[in-house]
Image (tube, rainbow, N blue to C red):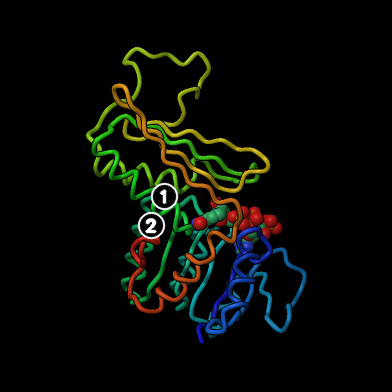
């Protein structure tokens, strides 16, 4: 039985993860973490306000769906205390990921930081990387609900990083283009553009649009419901038990 801690259990993703863990009889919900929770326990599962109180607690995996501002500290804490992190919270810098990978190796602990747990989104990233080899003109449009705190999304950044590996560098758009309203062309990453849309009613969506002479290619993925992420979280929880370092991206565990 794998014992799972869930940080951010009251949030949209965390509460969906609680249901997923409860419905898998090989997983045990060991503890819940939220700094503002008033409950001391829920259905026999202890609730912690301060993660420091979990030092020495018996659990295997730390699932994190919290906020970009705390996810790095939480992941570091998990590794330092022997919990294998499975982190969906976005907003990590490259330097933080590198540091956490090094820490996981020194502890011999598996872990996962995944900007997107939906299998379709993993495929979208893979297909985008392949297409970018032939279509260097590409723009990414990510669309999310209007409570999302970071922009661009972790998935958009990861997609751009993967595209960069196969695309021949090109500064997108006209050489003499001018923005008459700042930000009109979106964020720049290695010469390509990333646009972030925030609207109520959306969950998590992304389009990668390629253009060439006389043709276009649009790849799109839609998460209509947060349950779309849960098979990936489930795989992550099980797979981190079998590896000895943290990986960035669910594709490494599929
Ligand atoms: P959310 O509904 O705002 O949930 C975040 C929860 O974390 C809130 O209940 C918040 O409490 C709580 N929290 C804040 N600080 C905390 C701390 N120090 N320890 C424990 N809990 C804490 O957000 P969400 O929509 O679930 O998204 C959570 C994260 O997952 C975001 O970064 C989002 O981008 C990411 N995400 C990832 C994927 C993926 O596939 N990887 C998919 C969707 C979303 P308060 O509200 O009281 O502050």
Compared with residue 242, is residue 129 higher up or lower down, i.e. above or below?
above
Residue 171 appears left or right of 81: left
Categorize mark 2 by other alpha carbons within 10 Å: few (<14), some (14-19), many (20+): some
Compared with residue 4, is residue 145 higher up or lower down, i.e. above or below?
above
In what quadrant of the picture does the C terminus appear? Answer: bottom left
Depth check, front residue: 131 or 59 = 131
Q: What is the secondary structure assignment of the residue under circle 2?
A: helix
Can residue 69 be seen in the rendering of this structure? no
Residue 253 appears left or right of 179: left
Taking the spot 72% from the left edge, 63% from the top edge, the residue there is: 36
Taking the spot 50% from the left edge, 67% from the top edge, the residue there is: 231
Disc 2 within 8 angstroms of ligand 1 (CB): no
Task: State the CA–CA distance, disc 2 to disc 1.
Answer: 6 Å
Q: What is the secondary structure assignment of the residue under circle 1?
A: loop
Q: Are marks 2 and 1 in contact (CB under 8 Å)?
A: yes
Residue placed furthest toward the right = 38
Q: Position of residue 2 (x, y in %)?
A: 50, 83
Residue placed furthest toward the front = 214
Quadrant for ligand 1?
bottom right
Q: Name the residue under label 2.
A: 97
Can residue 186 be seen in the rendering of this structure? yes
Q: Position of residue 40 (x, y in %)?
A: 74, 77
Q: In which quarter of the image is residue 135?
A: top left
Q: Where is residue 232 in the image (x, y as percent from the top left)?
A: 47, 65
Taking the spot 53% from the left edge, 44% from the top edge, the residue there is: 205
Compared with residue 9, is residue 131 higher up or lower down, i.e. above or below?
above
Q: Mark 1 points at which residue?
A: 93
């Amino acid at each position: 039985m794998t014992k799972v801690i869930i940080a951010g259990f009251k949030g949209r993703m965390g509460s969906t993860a609680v249901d997923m863990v409860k419905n898998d009889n090989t997983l045990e919900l060991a503890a819940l973490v939220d700094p503002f929770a008033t409950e001391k326990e829920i259905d026999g599962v202890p609730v912690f306000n301060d993660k420091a109180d979990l030092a020495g607690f018996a659990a295997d995996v730390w699932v994190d769906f919290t906020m970009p501002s705390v996810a790095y500290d939480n992941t570091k804490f998990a590794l330092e205390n022997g919990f294998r992190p499975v982190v969906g919270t976005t907003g990590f810098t490259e330097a933080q990921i590198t540091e956490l990978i090094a820490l996981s190796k020194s502890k011999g602990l598996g872990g996962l930081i995944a900007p997107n747990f939906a299998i379709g989104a993993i495929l979208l990233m893979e297909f985008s990387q392949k297409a970018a080899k032939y279509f260097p003109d590409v723009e990414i449009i990510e669309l999310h609900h209007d409570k999302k705190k970071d922009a661009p999304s972790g998935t958009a950044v990861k997609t751009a990083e993967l595209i960069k590996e196969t695309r021949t560098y090109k500064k997108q758009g006209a050489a003499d283009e001018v923005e008459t309203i700042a930000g009109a062309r979106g964020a720049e990453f290695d010469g390509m553009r990333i646009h972030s849309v925030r609207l109520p009613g959306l969950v998590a969506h992304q389009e990668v649009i390629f253009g060439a002479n006389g043709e276009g290619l649009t790849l799109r993925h839609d998460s209509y419901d947060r349950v779309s992420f849960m098979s990936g979280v489930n795989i992550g929880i099980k797979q981190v038990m079998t590896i000895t370092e943290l990986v960035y991206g669910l594709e490494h565990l599929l």
